């Protein structure tokens, strides 16, 4: 009971002080290439989501930072920095990625901040995002980052692929690559770009596109969770994550697959008021909450489909999570809970960068 009282009191105090005048919206790591909201959001990442080691914590939950950092977040901030030519941000975070996450061929997906120990397991989607960030920065600075792009490329090909061009969800030191791949990991546009560094990516990209093109589809445009290489079957899971399904739809739309049924479902949900985080296969929510990332991704997906009206609606809903003033100034999060997730924050920033 005493713990509950203290928690309630701390949240009340936090929400009272959250309305105090905002701190400075400028960070020494954020330059002048950004629009005001992007600049303030980037300053929040640099000043509030970054720990003393220079890595991004996964979240601030109930006003407290979590005790781990993800390669996911580091890839997101590097991609944001590279696309916006924000070299101060890049030059700050990029060395930490090499120092703490790089494991000689792959990136550890998570770091424990208590001892800075890396979990010696990769995540394909995070390694591809980092590869994309390095390729963009290599385009900005020809010759400077080619060696790291090649190192990521070679690591993924040698550690995570098989002779058939399958590329697994993860590589685990000591046990090898996964025998399946999550469909929302299949960032084939990045694979296509990697063919300029190693032509073995042609086979991997072709196989990945085949998996996306041939995937089955349930009502509402819901897609499977993953594909098993050894069994040759798609697996559905227990329900549908909207973040995962939107990413899958984005990647499928990129290669020309018809995703109209899913687009219609998302439009219906927007008309009903919310796109929820998770759904049952009957189209009803299984988790009755929406989130920043769902709207950020939905906005990009609608823009890809050429539906500017729905893209703007989703973008407006994303922006309603933006906090101005107080301790969370610049956050895309939940003021009353004192909670901000790095994935949400950075996906919102990447969506704003695309100028939909």
Image (cartoon, rainbow, N blue to C red):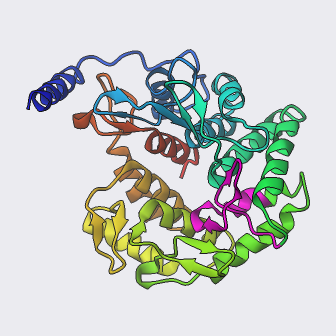
* Label tally: 0
Determine whether 221 is above or below 148 in the image: below
Camera-nearest residue between 46 and 28: 46
**Residue at left offset 55%, top offset 47%:** 355
**Residue at left offset 34%, top offset 69%:** 279
Horizontally, residue 291 falls left or right of residue 188, namely left
Determine whether 248 is above or below 11 in the image: below
Horizontally, residue 160 falls left or right of residue 233, namely right
Q: Residue 333's x, y, as percent?
A: 34, 39
Instruction: Specify whether residue 256 is in view.
Output: no
Taking the view exactly as shown, the residue that stands out farthest to the front is 174
Horizontally, residue 38 falls left or right of residue 134, namely left
Camera-nearest residue between 103 and 287: 103
Quarter residue 254 falls in = bottom right
**Residue at left offset 52%, top offset 75%:** 224
Q: Residue 204's x, y, as percent?
A: 80, 66
Span shown in magenta: 164-191
Residue 257 is covered by the magenta coloring = no
**Residue at left offset 62%, top offset 60%:** 185
Determine whether 286 is above or below 109 in the image: below
Residue 190 is covered by the magenta coloring = yes
Q: Residue 250's x, y, as percent?
A: 58, 65
Q: Residue 236's x, y, as percent?
A: 48, 76
Instruction: Specify whether residue 276 is in view.
Output: yes
Horizontally, residue 308 falls left or right of residue 319, namely right
Quadrant showing the N terminus: top left
């Amino acid at each position: 009971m005493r713990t509950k009282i203290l928690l309630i009191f701390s949240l009340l105090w936090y929400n009272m002080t959250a309305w105090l005048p905002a701190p400075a919206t400028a960070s020494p790591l954020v330059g002048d290439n950004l629009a005001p909201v992007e600049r303030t959001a980037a300053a929040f990442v640099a000043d509030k989501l970054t720990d003393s080691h220079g890595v991004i914590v996964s979240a601030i939950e109930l006003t407290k930072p979590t005790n781990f950092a993800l390669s996911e977040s580091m890839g997101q901030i590097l991609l944001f920095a590279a696309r916006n030519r924000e070299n101060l941000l890049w030059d700050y975070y990029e060395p930490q990625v090499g120092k703490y996450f790089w494991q000689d061929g792959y990136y550890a997906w998570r770091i424990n901040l208590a001892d800075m120990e890396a979990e010696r397991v990769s995540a394909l989607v995070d390694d591809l995002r980092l590869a994309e960030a390095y390729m963009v920065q290599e385009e900005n600075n020809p010759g400077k980052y080619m060696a790291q792009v090649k190192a990521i490329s070679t690591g993924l090909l040698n550690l995570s692929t098989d002779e058939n061009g399958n590329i697994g969800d993860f590589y685990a030191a000591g046990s090898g690559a996964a025998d399946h791949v999550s469909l929302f990991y299949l960032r084939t546009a990045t694979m296509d770009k990697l063919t300029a560094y190693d032509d073995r990516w042609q086979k991997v990209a072709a196989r990945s596109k085949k998996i996306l093109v041939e995937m089955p589809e349930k009502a509402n445009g819901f897609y499977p969770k993953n594909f098993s290489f050894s069994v040759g079957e798609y697996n559905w899971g227990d329900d549908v994550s909207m973040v995962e399904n939107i990413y899958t739809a984005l990647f499928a739309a990129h290669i020309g697959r018809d995703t109209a049924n899913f687009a219609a479902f998302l439009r219906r949900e927007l008309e009903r008021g919310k796109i929820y985080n998770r759904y049952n296969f009957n189209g009803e929510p299984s988790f009755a909450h929406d989130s920043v990332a769902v709207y950020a991704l939905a906005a990009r997906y609608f823009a890809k489909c050429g539906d500017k009206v729905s893209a703007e609606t989703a973008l407006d809903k994303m922006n309603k999570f933006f906090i101005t003033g107080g301790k969370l100034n610049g956050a895309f999060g939940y003021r009353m809970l004192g909670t901000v997730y790095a994935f949400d924050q950075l996906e919102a920033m990447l969506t704003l960068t695309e100028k939909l």
